[in-house]
Amino acid sequence: MLATGVILDLEPAHGLAVFAAAYLIAGYDVLWSAARDVRALRPFNENLLMAIASLGAFAIGDQMEGVAILLFYQVGELFQDYAVSKSRRSIGSLLEMMPDSANLVDGDSVRAVDPSEVHVGDTVLIRPGEKVPLDCTVASGESMIDASSITGESVPRRAVAGDALLSGTICSNGSVTATVTAEYSDSTASKIREMIESSYEAKSRSENFVTKFARYYTPAVVLSALALAAVPGLVLGDPETWIYRALTFLVISCPCALVISIPMAFFGGIGGASRAGILVKGGNYLEALAGVRVVAFDKTGTLTEGVFEVSEVRAEGMGADELVRLAAHAEIDSSHPVAAGIRRAFGGELDRGSVGGVGEAPGMGVSSMVGGRLVSVGSAALMESRGIRAPEPGGFGTVAHVAVDGEYAGYMLISDRVRRDSARAVSALAGMGVEAVMLTGDGDAAARHVSAEVGIREVRSRLLPGDKVGALEEIISGGRRVAFVGDGVNDAPSLARADVGVAMGALGSDAAIEAADMVITDDMPSKVPLAIKIARKTRSVSMQNIAFALGVKALFLALGVMGEITMIEAVFADVGVALIAILNAMRTLSVPRLGGGGAPAAADNVK
């Protein structure tokens, strides 16, 4: 219809009717939205700017430009909607990881039920091609597990009896029966979905800047346009020319490039991180991570695998087997990996009836009544708190000292393996200009051994949970932003105190995951430098968009005031800036590659 009005040489009245019809077809929704926002006392947005500019063009006799303004604006909106929907589809695929049903084994029969009806201890059957419905442990059978949607691993791994399965992963081939280890609401996929959905609510500083900017910017440009339309026309004459320039000014000033592209950049960054197995609870944490200059690692279960085996036992006044038996019973209810290693070393059946009065000292150990005897198992700090002198063994490993009825009874040396990519993580951080330090409650020998293997120079050992927080505050007080990476209950205070808390999610405790700002689903330390790289890329893209949009706006606003561009050219400028900014924001959806490697440097500062 616009083409009809342009091509045909119509009478003024007929031409006005044709252009008016084209105007309503092209812009009725813009006019309706503007009227609705004015009625709701939220008038200052791009809908009002486009409505004023297009109606003003009609008022001064430029009907074709009035229609063209809305037509080109709508074309720009279509491209923007496409870009945003593509971003949302990328995130939406992550939210589809939740299985629709679970095959509950009930005696000799199997029935499909809602996963929320399955409880801890129940047995489920997972067939080839099906999603794992809840966190569970394989009881029988074997299969190749595709964990790409949860951990970002591209290569399926083999799962056999005894292996843990995370909900949302897929059995590629082979059926398995598995024992459920977590309720539906506590399973990995459910937590991931909850984190992704809640992450949209936490805005970054860049997003908040854009929101506040638009709140003041839009009324400012409307008032400026009114002044441009009125003052020069009264002083210099030719009011129609200045009204036209004021309308052009309004079109150019539309802030949609910023309002759409900045949140989209962080939306894409969160989505890209999620596909790599890194869950971010909000754009504000992603922006904070971009500025991190120090990463403090816990040792046990973070840089190491957290799977302990007793490698040496030294007993005083009793046999080694009796020492292990007493320690295993004292640790009967502890979830700490060291406690699990001690129980495995005992190997026999634990007599729960002989254990009572269990008390835990976070970060130090436990004390329990075992067969009427007070047994304390833990670090040298626990022994010191009981007034018991404990030796410092010279071997490598975590030391679990044992005291019985207030007398020192010996110790167990418990070894842990360093994670295969811990050295790569430290090397990658160094290449990014980020310092890695270790904060551990373990002894000096174990800390020194692990730090030398992974390449961390600054190590602080024998730290209680409060000491770790103090160490973080010391780093923060020096003006450096710090991230803390941990997995245990005793790490929760440090995760909460750090500028960014990063929890190891697959084996980490619920307390650590709750206190953290980010969760690594596959417990790989190398995901920490990858997360920083994603955060820096996201921040860079958002800053590029802010600078580009404001720079181009300023240039074209000046040209509009001088009368060097038309309203149609102003629309092209506005839509073009928005599209370029959005296309740039979409780059955050792709996950950057992580470098790293190289020989680790020996530790030289153990405290």
Image (cartoon, rainbow, N blue to C red):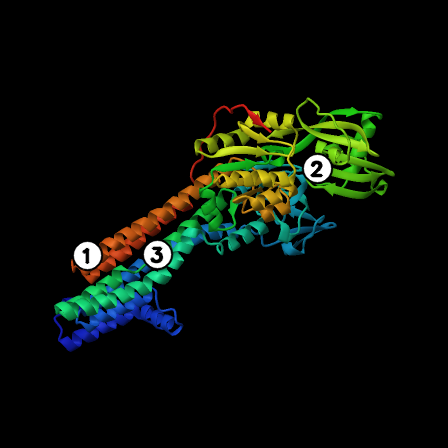
Mark-to-mark CA distance, 1 and 3: 26 Å
In terms of depth relative to the viewer, which is nearer, 447 or 161?
A: 447
Quadrant where the image shows the C terminus: top right
Q: Horizontal placement of 420 versus 581: left or right?
A: right
Tally of marks: 3
Which tag, 2 or 3, sits closer to the chain's start? 3
In terms of depth relative to the viewer, which is nearer, 86 or 373?
A: 373
Q: For the residue marked with disc 2, what is the amino acid?
A: Met
Asked which quadrant contains residue 250, the reply is bottom left
Q: Residues within 10 Å of mark 1 (few under 14, many from 20)?
A: some
Q: Horizontal placement of 64 versus 146: left or right?
A: left
Kindly report which numbered mark, 1 or 3, lies closer to the viewer in this rendering: 1
Q: Horizontal placement of 318 versus 127: left or right?
A: right
Q: Residue placed at 19% from the left, 74% from the top?
A: 16
Look at the picture and state if 109 lies above or below 53: above
Q: Position of residue 475 (x, y in %)?
A: 52, 38
Which tag, 1 or 3, sits closer to the chain's start? 3
Residue 162 visible to the viewer? yes
Q: Position of residue 168 (x, y in %)?
A: 57, 47
Q: For the residue marked with disc 1, what is the amino acid?
A: Leu
Q: For the residue marked with disc 3, what is the amino acid?
A: Gln
Q: Which residue in the protein does label 1 denote?
A: 559
**Element under label 3?**
helix
Q: Position of residue 528 (x, y in %)?
A: 51, 38
Asked which quadrant contains residue 247, the reply is bottom left
Q: Which residue in the protein does label 2 denote?
A: 364
Kindly report which numbered mark, 2 or 3, lies closer to the viewer in this rendering: 2
Q: Residue furthest right?
A: 372
Q: Position of residue 433 (x, y in %)?
A: 44, 33
Q: Which residue in the protein does label 3 denote?
A: 80
**Element under label 2?**
loop
